[in-house]
Image (tube, rainbow, N blue to C red):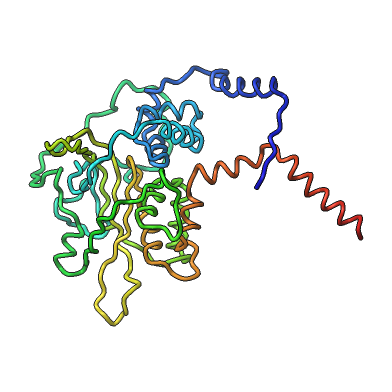
């Protein structure tokens, strides 16, 4: 598709940009980046995930500049990320080493290590809280931590799938130690590899991933109700190896959400012994809905069905990318004078030839 650049109206364009930058200051006070960082955690988590750039300060800054527009903030984050040098790669991380802050299972009431509810809106009434109209100086009340015996290390909590594996209900797939593909350095090629699919899903627009995951469950795919075997939210340690003979160096940790979704076994005959299959979801920050939907789509793409849109990796991965989809839709309002006039000319010529 070709476009012709149109130049003109520079003064009008400059004024438009100035109006946009000053708009947030017309009716009120400017908001501090630190306040965005403190009060808009879910939004920051979504922006970091879709930008594949874990930096809460930069995400808050991007949200301020974008006036809360998620798609614009993600675009700004990705653009900034592309200017940064890549100094090193982390070593392989093991989520079993996560410091768990929240851990629940919808499949078992009792799990090794217990259910850890953590901070979640799941147990709140979805009603507006009038108390939030006033600015609070601190927590409204102290949290009541009861002394409950706990015999597990939060850095090494067992996984629910280990329990199923011991019973022979889950068969672990052979490890694939091939170097993963990085879609931020090389364009996805189809059919895609699983590392490309997982990276594309975790970078996907939250609403799009959720919508396609929902469509998959409703009947446009597996048409089955998956069960969440384990949902983990916590701090994942990151290490790098400088290859100086001293081993790994711990450089910090980041918040993440991990989902093990138990899916129906569609590959085996019903008369044979069936096993639990896993759909996997992992995203930056606490964003459980997206991670669950990601696990559903991961399973759909890993076990494709003919004629199902959510089993088509090109359909899914291209259309959930927020920058790709938002950028193309948004560009439609920019000048297309030449191409549209060309269409009108063909229409007029066709009418005159009749």
Where 95 sits versus 337, above or below? Answer: below
Please indicate whether residue 124 sits to the left or right of residue 251 in the image: right
Residue 102 position, x and y percent, is: 24, 44
The residue at the point 47 percent across, 60 percent down is 215
Q: Which of the 4 image quarters holds residue 293?
A: bottom left
Q: Quadrant of the C terminus?
A: bottom right
Question: Residue reaching furthest front?
Answer: 244
Residue 37 position, x and y percent, is: 37, 28
The residue at the point 83 percent across, 53 percent down is 347
Is residue 51 visible in the rendered image? The answer is yes
The residue at the point 38 percent across, 31 percent down is 84
Q: Nearer the viewer, residue 29 or 280?
A: 280
Q: Which of the 4 image quarters holds residue 278?
A: bottom left
Residue 264 position, x and y percent, is: 33, 68
Is residue 293 visible in the rendered image? The answer is no
Q: Nearer the viewer, residue 187 or 105?
A: 187
Q: Nearer the viewer, residue 146 or 227?
A: 227
Q: Nearer the viewer, residue 285 or 77?
A: 77
């Amino acid at each position: 598709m070709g476009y012709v650049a149109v130049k003109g109206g520079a003064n009008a364009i400059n004024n438009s940009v100035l109006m946009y930058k000053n708009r947030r200051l017309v009716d009120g006070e400017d908001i501090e980046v630190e306040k965005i960082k403190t009060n808009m955690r879910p939004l920051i988590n979504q922006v970091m995930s879709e930008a594949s750039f874990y930096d809460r300060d930069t995400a808050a800054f991007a949200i301020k500049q974008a006036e809360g527009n998620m798609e614009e903030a993600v675009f700004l984050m990705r653009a900034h990320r592309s200017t940064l040098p890549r100094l090193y790669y982390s070593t392989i991380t093991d989520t079993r080493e996560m410091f768990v802050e929240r851990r629940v299972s919808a499949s078992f009431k009792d799990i090794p290590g217990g259910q850890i509810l953590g901070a979640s809106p799941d147990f709140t009434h979805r009603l507006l809280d009038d108390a939030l109209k006033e600015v609070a100086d601190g927590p409204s009340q102290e949290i009541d931590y009861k002394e409950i015996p706990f015999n597990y290390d939060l850095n090494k909590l067992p996984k629910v799938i280990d329990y199923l594996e011991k019973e022979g209900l889950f068969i672990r797939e052979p490890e694939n130690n091939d170097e993963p593909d990085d879609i931020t350095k090389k364009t996805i090629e189809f059919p895609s590899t699983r590392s490309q699919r997982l990276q594309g899903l975790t970078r996907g627009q939250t609403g799009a991933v959720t919508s396609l995951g929902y469509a998959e469950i409703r009947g446009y795919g597996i048409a089955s109700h998956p069960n969440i075997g384990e949902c983990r939210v916590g701090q994942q340690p990151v290490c790098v190896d400088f290859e100086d003979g001293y081993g790994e160096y711990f450089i910090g940790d980041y918040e993440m959400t991990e989902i093990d979704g138990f899916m129906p076994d569609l590959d085996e005959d019903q008369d044979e012994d069936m096993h639990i299959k896993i759909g996997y979801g992992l995203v930056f920050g606490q964003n459980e809905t997206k991670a669950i939907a990601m696990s559903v789509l991961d399973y759909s793409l890993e076990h494709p069905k003919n004629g199902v849109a959510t089993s088509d990796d090109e359909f899914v991965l291209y259309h959930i990318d927020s920058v790709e989809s938002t950028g193309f839709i948004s560009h439609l309002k920019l000048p297309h004078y030449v191409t549209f006039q060309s269409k009108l000319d063909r229409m007029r010529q066709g009418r005159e030839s009749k």
